[in-house]
């Protein structure tokens, strides 16, 4: 049983190989040689040659020996060379174009490579090579820049205009009250810290204590009782709410009983005079 299986497997593989061989031959027979199709047997393959160090190679080609015609040219496979550093031709104006050359260092090889360049080399300080002469441009002053080509020594200068301030809020403003003066917001430059003269935090005077709604108490911030002279009465009797005010109402009973403290510091009566 095992033997039979092995046998049939090898037969199967043999058939598979035969079929694949036939198909390769079948494809080969279909290659189109154009005008040379009727004498295909005279077409020969021009062997490919691998590139070695300093010697170019070539790809495979086809030639008809009957007509003595190359059907498919052999392309060059460039050889690897051992190039040295680039040397630069002298020039006094890069824009007219100059050459960079490097040659193969291997003995017996004379391979050179050239590159034609027609722009200046401004250096790698920045991409475009500018550096400041003196003070850099800032918010209010322009500045000068220079650059020099490292190949032809050409120099260029330019002026960079003042950049202008960038205002940002420095301090919030606040409304005036009877407790503190008011101020507008201030703006200052993000870069030079200079304060915007148009938004430098104008001050507003402190407000007087004022009773706008007629309840006797100040409506401009402090909430205190306004006495006859415009000042705030600090006596517990004149606190609008709070513990002191509650205690005072108890104390008032005794004040009345012993007839003391009839008048408040602000001039108002604590209790009616007898
Ligand atoms: Zn070489
Ligand atoms: Zn031919
Ligand atoms: Zn240059
Ligand atoms: Zn500024
Ligand atoms: Zn007030
Ligand atoms: Zn009082
Ligand atoms: Zn009072």
Image (spheres, helix red, strand yellow):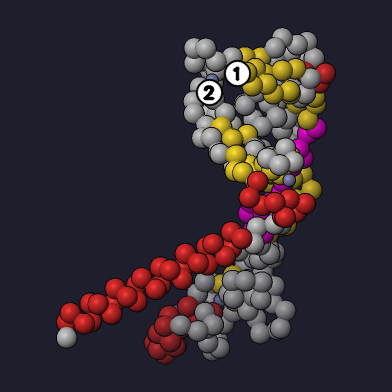
Tell me the residue at 67%/18% (across/down). Answer: 100
Percent x, y of residue 42:
65, 46
Q: Is mark 2 within 8 Å of ligand 1?
A: yes
Q: Is residue 190 above or below residue 217?
A: above
Foreground pick, 234 / 259:
234
Q: Disc 1 versus disc 2: distance between alpha carbons?
A: 8 Å
| Residue bounds of the magenta highlight | 161-173
Picture quadrant of residue 27: bottom right
Q: Main secondary structure of the magenta part?
A: loop
Which of the two discs, 1 and 2, labels the residue nearer the N terminus?
2
Q: Is residue 216 above or below residue 165?
A: below
Q: In the rendered view of the protein, which quadrant contains the N terminus?
A: bottom left
The reply to whether discs 1 and 2 touch (Cβ–Cβ < 8 Å) is: yes
Foreground pick, 267 / 258:
267
Percent x, y of residue 249:
44, 88
Q: Quickly name the residue at label 2.
A: 54
Picture quadrant of residue 15: bottom left
Residue 111 numbered mark, or none: 1
Q: Is residue 8 above or below residue 51?
A: below
Tell me the residue at 55%/39% (across/down). Answer: 48
Foreground pick, 89 / 174:
89
**Horizontal arrangement in the rendering, residue 130 relative to residue 9 (left or right):** right
Picture quadrant of residue 263: bottom right
**Helix or strand or loop: what does disc 2 sit on?**
loop
Q: Is mark 1 within 8 Å of ligand 1?
A: yes
Q: Residues within 10 Å of mark 1 (few under 14, many from 20)?
A: some
What number of labels is visible? Answer: 2
**Horizontal arrangement in the rendering, residue 197 relative to residue 106 (left or right):** right
Q: Is 16 in the magenta? A: no
Percent x, y of residue 125:
62, 26
């Amino acid at each position: 049983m095992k033997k039979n299986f092995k046998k049939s497997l090898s037969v199967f593989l043999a058939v598979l190989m035969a079929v694949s061989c036939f198909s390769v031959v079948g494809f080969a027979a279909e290659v189109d040689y154009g005008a040379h199709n009727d004498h295909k047997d005279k077409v020969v393959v021009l062997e490919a040659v691998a590139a070695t160090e300093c010697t170019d190679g070539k790809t495979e080609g086809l030639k008809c020996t009957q007509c003595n015609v190359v059907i498919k040219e052999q392309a060059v496979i460039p050889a690897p060379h051992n190039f040295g550093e680039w040397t630069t031709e002298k020039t006094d104006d890069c824009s007219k174009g100059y050459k960079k050359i490097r040659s193969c260092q291997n003995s017996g090889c004379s391979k050179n490579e050239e590159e034609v360049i027609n722009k200046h080399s401004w250096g790698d300080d920045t991409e475009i090579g500018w550096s400041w002469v003196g003070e850099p441009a800032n918010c209010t002053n322009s500045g000068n820049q220079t650059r020099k080509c490292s190949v032809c020594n050409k120099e260029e200068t330019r002026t960079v205009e003042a950049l202008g301030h960038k205002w940002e809020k420095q301090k919030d403003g606040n409304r005036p009250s009877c407790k503190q003066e008011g101020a507008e917001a201030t703006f200052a430059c993000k870069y030079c810290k200079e304060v915007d003269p148009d938004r430098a935090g104008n001050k507003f005077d402190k407000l007087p204590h004022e009773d706008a709604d007629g309840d006797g108490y100040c409506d401009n911030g402090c909430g205190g009782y306004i006495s006859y002279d415009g000042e705030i009465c600090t006596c517990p009797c004149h606190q609008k709410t709070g513990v002191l005010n509650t205690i005072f109402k108890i104390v008032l009973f005794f004040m009345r009983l012993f007839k003391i403290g009839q008048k408040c510091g602000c001039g108002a009566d604590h209790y009616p005079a007898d």
